[in-house]
Amino acid sequence: MRHGPIPGAHGRVRPLTLLGDPVLHAPSAEVTDFGPGLARLVEDLFASMYAARGVGLAANQVGEALRVFVFDCPDDEEVRHLGHVVNPRLVAADGIVLRGPEGCLSLPGLEAPTERFDRAVVEGFTASGEPVEVEGTGFFARCLQHEYDHLEGRVYPDRLTGRRRRKVLRQAAKASWGSGRTVSG
């Protein structure tokens, strides 16, 4: 049985920013106003994430350069993790480094094997200003690290090197949404 409102039910689906947009490549600003505007942004992030069939979404992916992300992501045991973090700090990323397929709503249709730790801990706040700590393992740890990277101005191709990096950037440039432009990702 579900308690409380469904996240994103009252949100507005916003257009997603794509690789190459400057907002994705600069660190996002700390949230200082925990008012109704922030609550609306979190709702919009959930609505936009669900509409795009993602498992996480950072505010800069809808053009808002603020340190907020949402998630609805399973771990490797298929346990669902649902929530949001405002002003997150990645306080731990450790364990085994695993290379696994990673995609991004800002690079639609593309994915590449990307190395991530299999455990991550993020601390921050809820939209109402309550402290929150989120710990993830496996796929959920990958999600937390991925969304945190967005707020630092990084996209997953930034973690790739050599042939893998060149391949995904070439695919992005050729993609219909890439408009043939050169992207430095």
Image (spheres, rainbow, N blue to C red):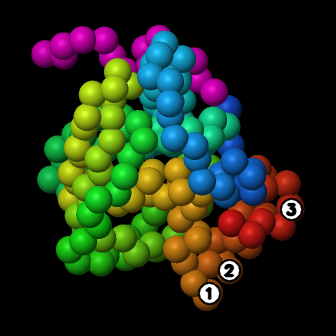
Task: Give the amino acid type for the residue marked by disc 1 in the picture.
Answer: Arg
x and y percent of residue 13 in the render? Answer: 59, 23
- Determine the main secondary structure of the stretch shown in magenta: loop
Which residue is tagged 3? 181
Residue depicted at x 43% and y 67%: 101
Label 3 sits on a secondary structure element that is: loop
Give the side of residue 45 with respect to residue 27, left or right.
left
Q: Which residues are magenta?
A: 1-14
Q: In the image, is residue 2 above or below residue 87?
A: above
x and y percent of residue 142 in the render? Answer: 35, 60
Q: Is residue 29 magenta?
A: no
Which residue is tagged 1? 163
Task: Name the foreground residue: 91 vs 164.
Answer: 91
Residue that protrudes farthest toward the front in the picture:
32
Give the crowd class for mark 1: few <14, some 14-19, many >=20 residues within 10 Å. Answer: few
Quadrant of the image for the N terminus?
A: top left
- What numbered label is drawn on residue 166? 2
Report, in whole angstroms, how far the alpha carbon at label 2 lies from the one at label 3. Answer: 14 Å
In terms of sequence position, does the residue under pointer 1 or pointer 3 come before the other? Answer: 1
Residue depicted at x 58% and y 69%: 157
Task: Give the amino acid type for the residue marked by disc 3 in the picture.
Answer: Arg
Quadrant of the image for the C terminus?
A: bottom right
Q: Are marks 2 and 1 in contact (CB under 8 Å)?
A: yes
Q: Is residue 12 magenta?
A: yes
Give the crowd class for mark 3: few <14, some 14-19, many >=20 residues within 10 Å. Answer: few
Residue depicted at x 24% and y 71%: 94
